[in-house]
């Protein structure tokens, strides 16, 4: 998984990058908030970010605020890196839109654990976004079958947008994932099939056996 | 001056309270530094060299901020320095930088600010030869931090 690191101090940045690479992350490093924001707002942006609070150009809190101005189905999980350990600073950081915070100098195990939470959240968001997309696509297909359909009262053909009369099954099949298997219902068997078979000379005993077969629904 | 924590609560030099700190913090805690690197001694070497290379810049930023009389910049420079020192296990200098940062942020008018800054310079002065030795460079390679020592310029907080 890719993670953005925004840290202006070269020593802290290098330690963080080395630690993240050891944890198996692909690191994208920048040295100021403006560069971080540009990357996080770009298409295909990393969904995990560790942003230092105090940075030139734009601080980490402002980066969080700006990111949250752009709602996304897959929001970036932001960990604010800070040496400010007092409660009001932590609240301010979280209120700005950070998902979590980490004290400097960071503890490696704590970083690993917090990144694990971030990874879970990102994967959960991605899974939800995929499901929402699938549902939207299904809904779009269902909508194609909604509305007033002109259908022949006798043959049950449906008139399409091009004014052609189509068999109901081909009409529906073209507009959904539904597939049809053909059979004969008991009613149609008696009114349509039996007279044709009698006319063709089929013996009544054999007809009775067939009727029994259909009425059993097999 | 090092080994003391300044807690100046008034604007007058006479009222600055100096409390001895205990216990004495390590100048360079190698075990702590190695622990910060997850036991990766190669990374620690790299970070130590990086710090040596950039130490002049760290100190210059601090000096420039003081000369400009901008407490906010002093706080920022101290903050950045503190972060780097923390990874190196330079506990004494880290503590000094933290005090300077806090003072710059919470009490920028305090005339003791320059003194807190001197504490940082002195702590870094103690640290650099140890780091230089650690990375295997001759002591002559260490930067001369004396040039970053301050006089009570009286500019800080006087804007």
Image (cartoon, rainbow, N blue to C red):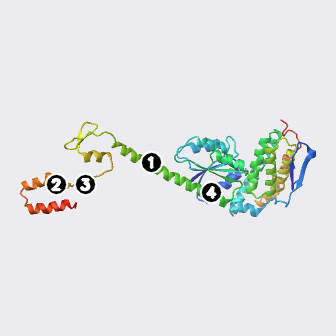
Q: How many labels does the image show?
A: 4
Badge number at residue B27? none
At 25% from the left and 36% from the top, the residue drawn is A163
The residue tagged with tag 3: helix, strand or loop? loop
Mark 4 vs mark 2: in front: 2
Badge number at residue A133? 1
Pointer 2 or 1: first along the chain: 1
At 68% from the left and 43% from the top, the residue drawn is A59
Badge number at residue A189? 2
Mark 2 vs mark 3: in front: 2
Left or right: B120 in relation to A66: right
Q: How crowded is mark 3: few (under 14 residues within 10 Å), some or many (20 or more)?
A: few
Residue position marked by numbered label 4 in the rendering:
A114
Pointer 1 or 3: first along the chain: 1
Pointer 4 or 3: first along the chain: 4
Label 4: chain? A
The residue tagged with tag 2: helix, strand or loop? helix
**Quadrant of image for the N terminus of chain A:** bottom right
Q: How far from the left and from the top, in percent, is residue B48?
A: 74, 56
Q: How far apart are marks 1 and 3 (CA)?
A: 30 Å
Q: Is any atom of residue A139 visible in this view? A: yes
Question: In terms of image quadrants, where is residue A25?
Answer: bottom right
Q: In this view, does A174 lie above or below A206?
A: above
């Amino acid at each position: 998984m890719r993670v953005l690191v925004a840290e202006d101090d070269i020593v802290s940045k290098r330690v963080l990058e080395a630690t993240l690479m050891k944890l198996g992350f692909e690191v994208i490093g920048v040295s100021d908030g403006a560069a971080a924001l540009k990357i996080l707002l770009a298409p295909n942006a990393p969904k995990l970010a560790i942003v230092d609070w105090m940075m030139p150009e734009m601080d980490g809190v402002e980066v969080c605020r700006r990111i949250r101005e752009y709602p996304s189905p897959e929001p970036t999980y932001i960990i604010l890196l800070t040496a400010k350990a007092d409660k009001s600073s932590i609240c301010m950081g979280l209120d700005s839109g950070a998902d979590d915070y980490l004290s400097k100098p960071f503890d490696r195990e704590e970083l690993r654990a917090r990144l694990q939470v971030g990874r879970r959240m990102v994967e959960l968001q991605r899974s939800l976004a995929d499901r929402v997309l699938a549902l939207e696509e299904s809904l779009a297909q269902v909508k194609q079958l909604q509305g007033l359909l002109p259908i022949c009262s006798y043959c049950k053909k449906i008139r399409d947008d091009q004014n052609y009369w189509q068999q109901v099954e081909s009409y529906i099949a073209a507009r959904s994932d539904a597939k049809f298997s053909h059979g004969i219902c008991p009613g149609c068997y008696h009114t349509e099939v039996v007279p044709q078979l009698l006319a063709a000379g089929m013996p009544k005993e054999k007809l009775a056996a067939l009727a029994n077969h259909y009425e059993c629904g097999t | 001056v090092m080994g003391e924590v300044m807690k100046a609560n008034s604007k007058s030099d006479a009222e600055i309270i100096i409390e001895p700190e205990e216990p004495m913090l390590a100048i360079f805690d190698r075990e702590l530094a190695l622990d910060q690197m997850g036991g990766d001694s190669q990374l620690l070497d790299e970070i130590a060299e990086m710090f040596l290379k950039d130490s002049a810049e760290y100190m210059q930023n601090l000096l420039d901020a003081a000369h400009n009389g901008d407490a906010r910049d002093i706080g920022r420079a101290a903050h950045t320095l503190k972060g780097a020192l923390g990874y190196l296990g330079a506990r004494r200098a880290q503590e000094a930088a933290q005090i300077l940062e806090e003072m710059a942020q919470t009490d920028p008018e305090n005339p003791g600010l320059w003194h807190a800054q001197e504490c940082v310079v002195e702590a870094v002065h103690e640290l650099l030869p140890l780091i230089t030795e650690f990375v295997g460079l001759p002591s002559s390679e260490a930067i001369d931090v004396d040039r970053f020592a301050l006089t009570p310029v009286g500019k800080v907080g006087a804007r």
